[in-house]
Amino acid sequence: MGRKVTAADVAREAGVSAATVDRVLNNRGGVSTDKERRVIGAAKRLKLDRALDLRAARTLRVAAILQSPQNPFHATVGQAFAEQNRGVNPFNIQTRVYVGDPAKPEQLQRIIQCAMATHDAIITCLPDDGPIAADLDRYADTGRPVIALAADIRAEKAIYVGPDDYAGGRIAGDLLGRFLGPSGGEIMLIGGLWSMIGQAQRRRGFEDVLVARHLRCNVVHVAESRESGDRAGELAARALRDHPNIAGIYNASAGGVKVAQAIERAGRSDLVYITHEFSDQRRTLLKVGQIDALLDQEPATEVGIALSVIAHHYGRLETLVDTKTPIRVHFRETC
């Protein structure tokens, strides 16, 4: 039999002191994140018995900055974080959700600056903003990860976890063009905040595919709901009054249900409606034909991937997972 691995072996492998190894493996704290990562990685490589089933010594504190749960997507994301906190949690990560208003960048920046002082990682789902991106890059420079969840930002050191939004927009545009057929028609496009990179990419993909494949489909009205479902419904109702020839609506953000209700009130059952994010309420609208197609990016999967990326950063997961998440398309007959 080979010699049993000792803490001294781990210390040599990790390039740290034996006292540091003792503090990490016995959860005593007071060790920098870089050294902790090196110790855990070395212990696993050397197959130290205590490291084989290591639940990870120190609890990692993660700040997730989301929008209000009145937005169904963010409600689902928040619920997914809560379930991860209560679940098996093999990486010993606890996430605290902070809620901010995407229309108030100063408020978001204050939340981020507070989180920077007390958390081991930050997950954001925010509009792109220069000062916020700069703060997040400074935070990442300290060796702690920043995850842009479902909404990319221009922080150079942030890791994006989410779908290919440009491809999502192209899928929506191609579906809408095919639904409308050779005669095409007028289209309304609704976004939440076009300053969010993902939504801007959806819009670009949507418009590009119409130009490439569906020339008789014309976007005649573009609106921004400011991430308010109620406002999205009001914008749709107003557009249907002002543009009675609208034949299709693509809603790239919040307000999926409110827009469907506006279409129903206008008596426009002939109109083609495509939106995002699967939920029980939207499943019902799909089944009765008030939504024609729904694109879903599986937010619970995104949350799991984001936490796995953080675990990998801290040496608690050996293999880095794919950070690109799939886009699922749901129809009346598949929901």
Image: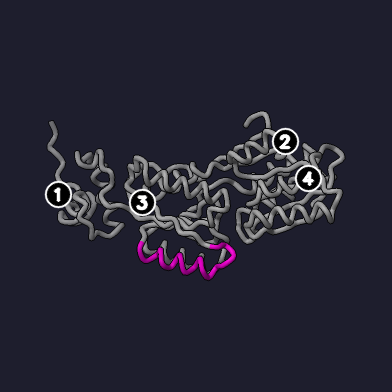
- State the image coordinates of residue 255 (x, y, percent, origin top left): 65, 51
Can you identify the residue that label 3 sits on? Answer: 94
Q: As rendered, which of 202 and 259 lies closer to the eye?
A: 259
Rendered view: 176 above or below 140: above
Q: Earlier in the sequence, mark 1 or mark 3?
A: 1
Residue 289, numbered label: 2
Of the 4 image quadrants, the one containing the N terminus is: top left
Q: Position of residue 14 (x, y in %)?
A: 24, 51
Residue 302 x, y percent position in the rendering: 49, 45
Please name the amino acid that badge 3 sits on.
Answer: Gln
Q: Which residue is mark 1?
A: 8
- Callout 4 crowding tier (Cα within 10 Å): few <14, some 14–19, many ≥20: many
- Which amino acid lies under the numbered mark 4 shown in the image of this protein? Gly
Q: Is residue 265 left or right of residue 28?
A: right
Q: Is residue 86 visible?
A: yes
Rounded to the nearest angstrom, the CA distance separating label 1 from label 3 is 30 Å
Amino acid type indicated by mark 2: Gly
Q: CA distance from mark 2 to mark 4?
A: 14 Å
Label 1, secondary structure: give it.
helix
Local crowd size for mark 1, using a 10 Å CA cut-off: few (<14), some (14–19), many (≥20):
some
Counting residues from the N terminus, which is met first, the one under dot 2 or under dot 1?
Answer: 1
Front residue of 135/256: it is 256
Q: Main secondary structure of the magenta part?
A: helix
For the point 63% across and 45% down, which residue is it?
276
Magenta span contains residue 278: no
Give the magenta range: 101-118
Q: Quadrant of residue 241?
A: bottom right
Instruction: Give the labeled residue for mark 4.
Output: 248
